[in-house]
Amino acid sequence: MGNNGNRITLKDVANECGYTVNTISRAMRNDPHLPESTRQMIQETAARLGYIPNKMASSLRSGKSHVVAVIVNDLHNQHFCQMLGKMDAELQSAGYSLLILCMQLNENLAQQLINTAISLSVDGILYFPHMQSEKQIETMVNHRMPFVLLDRWIENVTADSVRCDDENGGYLAGKHLAELGHRKYLYLSGLNLSSSQIDRLIGFKRAMKEYNIPDENVRIIPGETAEDALSRGRIVDLLYPLDYTAIVSFRDEMAYPAVNALRSSGISVPEDVSVVSFDNLYGSNPNLLPLTSIYASESDVASEGVKVLLKRIEDLYCPVQTKILPVCIYNENATAAEAKNK
Amino acid sequence: MGNNGNRITLKDVANECGYTVNTISRAMRNDPHLPESTRQMIQETAARLGYIPNKMASSLRSGKSHVVAVIVNDLHNQHFCQMLGKMDAELQSAGYSLLILCMQLNENLAQQLINTAISLSVDGILYFPHMQSEKQIETMVNHRMPFVLLDRWIENVTADSVRCDDENGGYLAGKHLAELGHRKYLYLSGLNLSSSQIDRLIGFKRAMKEYNIPDENVRIIPGETAEDALSRGRIVDLLYPLDYTAIVSFRDEMAYPAVNALRSSGISVPEDVSVVSFDNLYGSNPNLLPLTSIYASESDVASEGVKVLLKRIEDLYCPVQTKILPVCIYNENATAAEAKNK
DNA sequence: AGCGTTTAGGTTAACGATAACACAGATTAT
DNA sequence: ATAATCTGTGTTATCGTTAACCTAAACGCT
């Protein structure tokens, strides 16, 4: 008979076996001090009774929850989803579960989500910060909570981080287009200047300088979302009067409507206008868009991120880990077409 | 002065305020028995000290964790990811966090994931079952764990469920194609006969009967994954000799490579061959594929699912809830082109 | 004034598991 | 042969919070 309501606890197993809860607990954790036979007998009884350990209790006492939280900005964003899959796989094989906390595009939620994570005593946090937000970092540090910053760096913060080489990415974008002979550029920036945007622009400008393309040939269009800025009329207006022939978009999701707008106006991509973007969101579907995309493997970011976090969980005081993953530039179709054009 | 290591607990706040932990606990939970002034003072002190409640402890004592688990087959699948976003939003506004447990395409993990969920004392489970698996259901029932079956039904199980009207979906697919005048069909089925596949096929056959299309005009190609079955050669071989002009694919992810294969072989879609599929995965990108897709709003499945679960959490013994969401058939481009063709 | 009823808070015992310590009997070492 | 160690287990305290129960003062009412 169960103790209180219905849940089967160590106590129930103990009663059934004639041992104390302590011994059962040990058996379940495969404590080497128990003789093989006893352990087996206990584990079998536990299985027979349908015992499922209560991690809340265990975590409360032991301080380990075997749950890792990931904090992302938006679950509708494929970029994150692809990583979640990989992260989950890596975490699972290390014995962790994944708690997803999502800002729903509202950055003010970040602090609250971090509190939630701490509140649930997760063992670590995979954090995709959306803004330059030192306060959240401070909270985690104060609570001695292991964490890794993903995709971005944060000003004045030294902490474990995994991101791709955005500066080089921007450079490669510029170089690629410059070598194709383009002289006038539209650079679609975003509204929030995240670290990756800053780095990409810096790299891009470095390339421009290297190829002697003057500043005034690069028109930066900042602070707009894809939908509202890149409507057909707008992008065509922007392109034609000044003979821009190249577009750089800070991420594929922004490039996508731009390319659509161009095509609908009878402008071919990449024949008339070359487009370079970041993330390679559509990389797995090479027929979809004639984009050249700059990216680091999402899978690598995810698995490196997990690796770094697990290391930090294991040793809270190990030296700071920073991984900057190489980016590559690729799109079969676009590259081929552009080369032909050249 | 903290008690043990460093975490700030109720006790610390109590010491600081001169009340007992009980009173602090009450203040934090906004217990109406406390005078406004005391509560405010306590909450301010707690905030000042950086107190973050320990949900492990709270959950252990109170039996509520305010975490809901979702069990999915594959996080790389967009269909799930889209729902996760919506679910998370709905759950967040109800005060819950979302724990994602993923089978990594390995159905044998299902039982283990359910155990994990129970182990973590989640308040409920959103379950996308992958197979006809009664045992997992039994576990949840035994543990009085609220759950909702999503997307699928399970034989011999009566439980809360939310899914779309797959039978009608299949019917609409058949009707649509039959009315366009198609007489010979390739029906791409999947390897595992999930309930949605069964229902879709049943509905499709009903339409075939209604339009007097004999069984032998429908060739069912089962048990293959998209990649391996629908290579260029294969699909073209299948199409040409018998003059199939219509393809039904049990889900968009399978249709996608098929369409690509067709196009690469110089067969136009939808001009030469009409393709109907399910899920409307690419619906938000109408230029991507000339597919006609049958689907129910993912957002609806997600939010209905959450709604049903929350109700069940609130009252474990309320009557069984089953929601079958209407499907619609749509693709602007394909429909227009097909109509012109007709 | 006397008696019930709030009001504001304290006391105590859980929730389920685990860590630290204790300890008897068996085994080994010297 | 006796001390030292190991083996297998029980005892107790504790993780941080909450539920159930209790009390003392203040208040209202006839």
Image: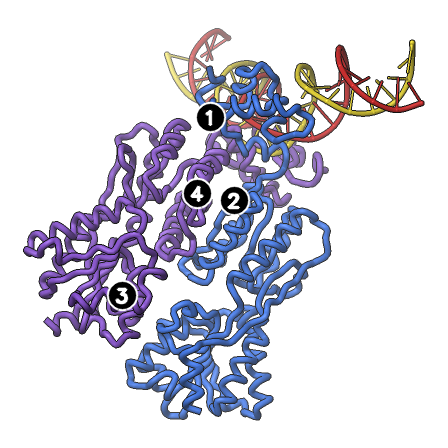
Chain colours: A blue, B purple, C red, D yellow
The amino acid at mark 3 is Ile
Q: Is residue D9 above or below residue A329?
A: above
Question: Looking at the image, can residue A249 be seen?
Answer: no
Which residue in the structure is indicated by mark 4?
Answer: B96
N-terminal label among 1 and 2: 1
Give the foreground label among 1 and 2: 1
CA–CA distance between discs 1 and 3? Answer: 49 Å
Q: Position of residue B132 (x, y in %)?
A: 32, 39
Which residue in the structure is indicated by mark 1?
Answer: A50
Name the side, left or right, on which A217 lies relative to B215: right
Same chain for labels 2 and 4? Say yes or no: no
Q: Which mark is residue B35?
A: none
Q: Position of residue B325 (x, y in %)?
A: 23, 48
- Give the SS element for disc 3: helix
Q: Are marks 1 and 2 in contact (CB under 8 Å)?
A: no
Tell me which residue sits at (39%, 32%) in the image.
B140
N-terminal label among 4 and 3: 4
Q: Nearer the viewer, residue A236 or B187?
A: B187
Subunit ID for the residue under disc 4: B
Which residue in the structure is indicated by mark 3?
Answer: B235
Which residue in the structure is indicated by mark 2?
Answer: A97
The amino acid at mark 4 is Tyr
Instruction: Determine the image quadrant of residue B188.
Output: bottom left
Give the foreground label among 2 and 3: 3
Q: Quadrant of the C terminus of chain B?
A: bottom left
Give the foreground label among 1 and 3: 3
Subunit ID for the residue under disc 3: B
Instruction: Determine the image quadrant of residue C20.
Output: top right
- Give the SS element for disc 4: loop
Tell me which residue sits at (43%, 71%) in the image.
A252
